[in-house]
Amino acid sequence: MQEANIRVFLDEEELHVGKEIADELPVAIEKSKIYIPIFSKGYASSAWCLRELAHMVDCKKSKPSEKEIMPIFYDVKPRDVKLKSQRYVSALEEHEEKFGRETRQKWEDALKSVAQIKGWELKKQGHWKFIQSVLQEIVMKMKTKDKYVTEHLVGMDDPKEAVRSCWTWTPGLALCPDKLKISYNALNHEQQQIFLDIACLFVDKDKTNALYMWKDCGFRPDHSIQVLVCMSLIKITDHNKFWMHDQPRDLGRKIVHGDTRPTNPRKQSRLWDLETADNIIGTKERKKHIEAICLWETRVYTSKEFSRLPNIRFLMLVGGNFSGDFENHFSELRYMTRTGVSREFLAINFHPSNLVVLELSYSSITEEWAGWSQFKVAKKLKVLDISHCSNMTRTPNFSDYLSLERLNLEDCKKLTEVDGSLKSLSSRILYHSKMINANCPLGWKEVQLDRLEQLVEFDVDDLDLEGFSGLSNLKRLKRLTLYECQNLTAIQGLGSLDSLEQLDISICPKIGSLDDLSNLKKLKSLRISNCEVLQAVKGLDELETLATLDLVNCDH
């Protein structure tokens, strides 16, 4: 635990010689938030263990929302602790002779109670893997600093038969390289891959699109990100971006480089240095280790060059173009980000069938771009970003992108038509729609949301929007942002969004009233600004989860 940046105090430090141990242990237990009794073969032989276990159970009963018991079944099974075998029964019989029937019953009840809790069993897994899983779970529970944990290690083959400790953990501390490496080693494979991706590719980048790639790769990103945050290896900023201190970032890049010995860059899994990447892609040997590459050259990259990268799953290309026959290439590609794409598309058979994220922002492409027909095979595509494509007057046909969930049309200033195929999608699409003109066939005067039941986020910026229909159907909606909707007069159905967590209404000068918000039981952030004619907002007193309330220039 010390090596994982959890400060450990052993009994000789916390329970000072000359003081009454019976007085100090209950105090230590009462101050703790998480209890970890470790059941071994000799556990029930110790009256101290049983006495402390009973006290843990009492504390848990008195403050059930503040305390948690997380048992470890080291070399016994839960059925042993439930007293369904003789392993602990004989020890309890001996205790009864010394302490009486009432004490024995109290200890029995405590054992049976804790044995009902799902804990860890060592079984046949290796000690190191077992320690990893325990450590991760504990760190996940200790999300805020200065939470105390009492651990009781008794009956194990150790010179110190009884170890009693309180742990405190303070996230965000600078770590020496050795301790950082230990924290990295405590991660499982999927968490390590995400950590290395962030260190090499996604520092100060929005996390949303990366999550789609990791999910499709089987990296369990929601849980893995939570682990990395709780271990203070990364942070998520208020702007939904990854932040990483220089030390863990450098560690991640050092690991990819080959740890302490720089290796041949051809054997690196990720190439983020632009000069190195461009040099490596031109070499003739097959580079099966490379999973991610960032290129920033205005030259044309050939299919022959990419044929030597069979396992690439992330590709960034700024400027430049593709040429040649790409059949059977990019079978592992999940994430492609291209900036400054020209109107010409020189490649043929460009079929990234497993692509889930496609970013084409700040490009010269139009709806007639030849590349659209090449990407039709991307049936798994979840994200399409064509923001800041200033020449686009009409969106492409979306009928082949049946899995599309996120569409970013931000700052497409000439866009006047959204293809009607968008209506036929699977109703899970998220629009980012800054600067779209109002004469769109989808009806941007009144947005129809009836078929978008799976919508999680909805951001509208600078439209001539006058109203919604079907907003009350969005039972999964977590974030609603309305910005500079100059003609919007009402938001019907707002009070029915019982999953809503963030509501931001800014510079909507014609909104006169809002629904009663008392049913928004999950709302955490409410920001209303520059809505000059808005009357009193009802239901604020009943928003128990509200953490942020910002009302600015709402004179009424």
Image (spheres, rainbow, N blue to C red):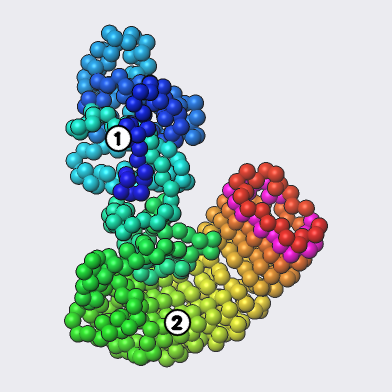
Q: Position of residue 442 (x, y in %)?
A: 61, 73
Residue drawn 41% across the image and 42% down it: 168
Residue 532 is covered by the magenta coloring:
yes
Residue 497 visible here: no
The residue under label 2 is 339
In the rendered image, the quadrant that contains the N terminus is top left
230 magenta-colored: no
Q: Magenta segment range?
A: 516-535
In this rendering, would 454 be left or right of 199?
right
Reply above or below: 525 against 71.
Answer: below
Residue type marked 2? Thr
Measured from the top left, where is residue 13 in percent x and y? 35, 34
Is residue 108 depicted above or below 311 in this figure?
Answer: above
Residue nearer the viewer, 347 or 235:
235
Residue plotted at (49% across, 88% down): 364
Please name the predominant secondary structure of the magenta segment in the image.
Answer: loop
Q: Which mark is residue 72?
A: 1
Residue 202 is labelled as none
In-front residue for pair 191/416:
191
Inter-mark Cα distance, 2 to 1: 52 Å
Identified at 63% across, 58% down, the residue is 503
